[in-house]
Amino acid sequence: FIGAQAEAPISETIDYIRYLGGSPTNVAMNMSHLGMKVTMISSVGNDGFGDYMLTRFDEAGIDKSYVKKIDNIPSTAIFINNTAGTPEFLAYRGADKEIDPEQIPDSLLSLAKIYHTTCFALSLEPARETILSGAERAAKKGVQLSIDINYSEKIWPDQKQAQEAIARYCRLGPLVKISQDDVNRLLGKGISHEAVFNYLHDIGAKIICFTLGKEGAKLSQQGQEIIKLSALKVDKIMDVTGAGDAFWSGFLYGHIQSQKPEQCMATGLKMAAIKLQNGGRITDYSDVISDFSND
């Protein structure tokens, strides 16, 4: 639920607009709109919000065969204020954490090119062990892993536990997205970008994208020179919620299309710029797709 009043804190927000959200869901929706075949692994409550989410998956053409409905546990809801800066959020956790191993069968992993998750998804059991074990099985099958290290102590108070789970995932050589806010919360303020890259490479990250908001993004591959690209100019920002997810969707799309990392990052920045100019979800990324058809 995203606030309707611009720059109002949650305590002063009067109205909210409902969207299907959550970082992995945003990426799934974006990838589907880019023409990719996407399967969502999650759980929702057996309630009106759960029905709403499943309907939206159908509308987007996302395979929901591995989304489970849970009785007696409500669907997870998140409230976010409307701001051009770092949003304030309140999470009311429910069914999202109820992910079991049978929701990630080997038959599904055998079809996958990308296996993506986030710190939010890893923050609670049984989802944490299910996702980590699934990642290990996926890696053995040659699937490229991906993670958005969107750590928040509000969601995952045990910082050491979070670091250990992230390290276990990173040992499998994932593509990693991280932001300055994430770094501040996970590792502490004042840490240089180089130190962040070294830390993540040392625990196994293959390619790291450090998103810098209006400053663009940096990309690090171990043993190679760091690449930095500027953000595209946006004259009027309508909504920052989901911009990072749009960026990562573009990056993963480029990776699947066998683009070089710098081009993947450029596509991600273009998608982020489109998202910033629109409130809620964007369904038309045709300009991004045309870039690839013209290459």
Image (cartoon, rainbow, N blue to C red):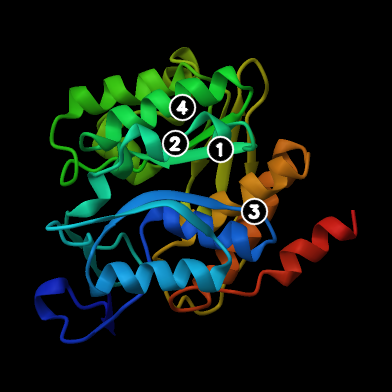
Residue with the mark numbered 1: 108
In the drawing, does residue 5 fall left or right of residue 222?
Answer: left
Whether residue 195 is visible to the viewer of this picture, yes or no, is no
3D distance between C-alphas at marks 2 and 1? 7 Å
Q: Say which label, 4 or 3, has the lower sequence index.
A: 3
Q: Marks 4 and 3, Cα distance to the nearest angstrom?
A: 19 Å
Mark in front: 2 vs 3: 2
- Identify the amino acid type marked 1: Leu
Query: Quick one: label 4 or label 1, which is nearer the N terminus?
Result: 1
In the displayed structure, 60 sits above or below 168; it is below
Under mark 2, the amino acid is Ile
Q: 94 and 6: which one is in front?
A: 94
Q: How far apart in space, not on screen, are marks 2 and 4 (Cα)?
A: 9 Å
What's the residue at 61%, 56% (across, down)?
269
Sequence-first tag of 2 and 3:
3
Q: Residues within 10 Å of mark 2 (few under 14, many from 20)?
A: many
Number of marks drawn:
4
Q: Is residue 40 above or below residue 1?
A: above
Left/right of residue 162 with respect to residue 249 in the rendered view = left
Using the image, tell me which numbered label, if any, was put on residue 104.
2
| Left or right of 256 in this view: 71 | left
**What mark, if any, has residue 37 been given in the picture?**
3
Q: Is residue 291 visible?
A: yes
Whole-percent x, y for residue 221 in the image = 62, 24
Secondary element at image label 4: helix
Indicate the secondary structure of the residue bearing disc 3: loop
Q: Quadrant of residue 110?
A: top right
Residue holding disc 4: 135
Q: Who is closer to the viewer here, 38 or 247?
A: 38
Which residue type carries mark 3?
A: Lys
